[in-house]
Image: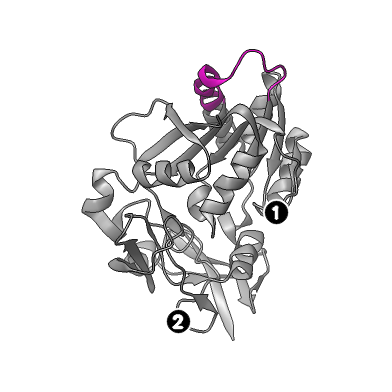
Amino acid sequence: MYNLLIVLQKPELRVLAIVEDGVAESRRVHTLSIPYRARAGRLERRPICLYNPDGTRPMKTVPCNLCGSMKWHLLFEKQGFTIVRCDACGLAWVNPQPEENEIAAYYQTAYHGRALPTRRKERTKLAEARATLRGLRRWVDRRWSPVRLLDIGSGFGFLLAEARRIGWNGCGIELAGWQAEFSRTRFGAEVIPAPFPGSQLPPASFEVITMLEVIEHLPDPALALSECARLLAPGGVLLLRFPDFGHPRASRLGPAWRGSVVPDHLYYFSLATLKSMAQRAGLVYAGRLFNPPWREITKAVFRKP
């Protein structure tokens, strides 16, 4: 049975790949002349992922990743997936979830539609990375020279490129091998094509670890934070940027909130639930990078004692 992987582009709907048994071809195979407005209410403005909530692919029920409770209540449904909230600690997540091998296949084949960044987007992302590192420097001990940085979910390597420019030794971990290859080719970045956790790096290897809009994608964020604590040197800092489910618009809009991206986002953190999870991993909340109050993304900094 075939599934169509599609992305919406004005004024046509372009079929980018045909998927069979979880394997996608990245070439465009067909073009349908379907007006944008006529179907806009029924289609997503992003690639449809490989997970199938209709029962044709394996799904698993998971306990709360923060407190382990099996008691939760329904928040909302979206595209056949259910988002629940723990009755004990307040963490929200997709439940049931796809199997981890399905998640890995998605990021290898379909995430971002395997589209490489344009020059314009590259300039924008490099400027964003520059601002992130500039804000992070206030927590960096000047005795660390050079700073060893690990960027988890390094994507196309923009943060690693900027880290090298300011004299930091940067290393990335990226599940999508094609993005890791772009980072190496375009910026000469050192990137490990592997899932996280699972890279087998030695303990206390880094003074700074960044996870920029990554933790909400991971099937076991508590384990990921524990691994970050293991990899950080004493006094090291962890920067987490994530869609803030505690933002007033998130509760008001529910499934229509821009951060409700299912099932890409498996977990929906507020700052409070993320603080609790980080504390259990042995990390101490240190503060936030500046973010305008109307932005729904929070940049939280944690430190290893």
Residue 244 visible somewhere in the drawing: yes
Mark 2 lies on residue = 54
Mark 1 lies on residue = 198
Which corner quadrant of the image does residue 256 belong to?
Answer: bottom left
Name the image quarter holding the C terminus: top right
Please tell me how crowded label 1 is: few (under 14), some (14-19), or many (20+) other residues with Cα within 10 Å: few
Residue type, numbered disc 1 = Gly
Q: What segment is highlighted magenta in the picture?
A: 130-147
Q: Nearer the viewer, residue 41 or 230?
A: 230
Q: Residue 138, position in %: x, y?
A: 51, 17
Establish if 111 lies above or below 33: above
Establish if 205 lies above or below 40: above
Q: Nearer the viewer, residue 305 or 205?
A: 305
Please tell me how crowded label 2 is: few (under 14), some (14-19), or many (20+) other residues with Cα within 10 Å: few
Q: Is residue 133 magenta?
A: yes
- Residue at the (62%, 74%) spot, across then down: 18
Q: Residue furthest top?
A: 142
Q: Residue 134, position in %: x, y?
A: 53, 20
- Mark 1 or mark 2: which comes first in sequence? 2
Q: Residue furthest bottom?
A: 1
Name the image quarter holding the N terminus: bottom right
- Residue at the (52%, 53%) spot, across then down: 221
Residue 153 visible somewhere in the drawing: no
Q: Is residue 246 left or right of residue 194?
A: left
- Residue at the (29%, 68%) spot, across then down: 74
The label nearer to you, 1 versus 2, is 1
Tag 1 secondary structure: loop
Question: How many numbered circles are shown?
Answer: 2
Residue type, numbered disc 2 = Asp
Q: CA distance from mark 1 to mark 2?
A: 30 Å
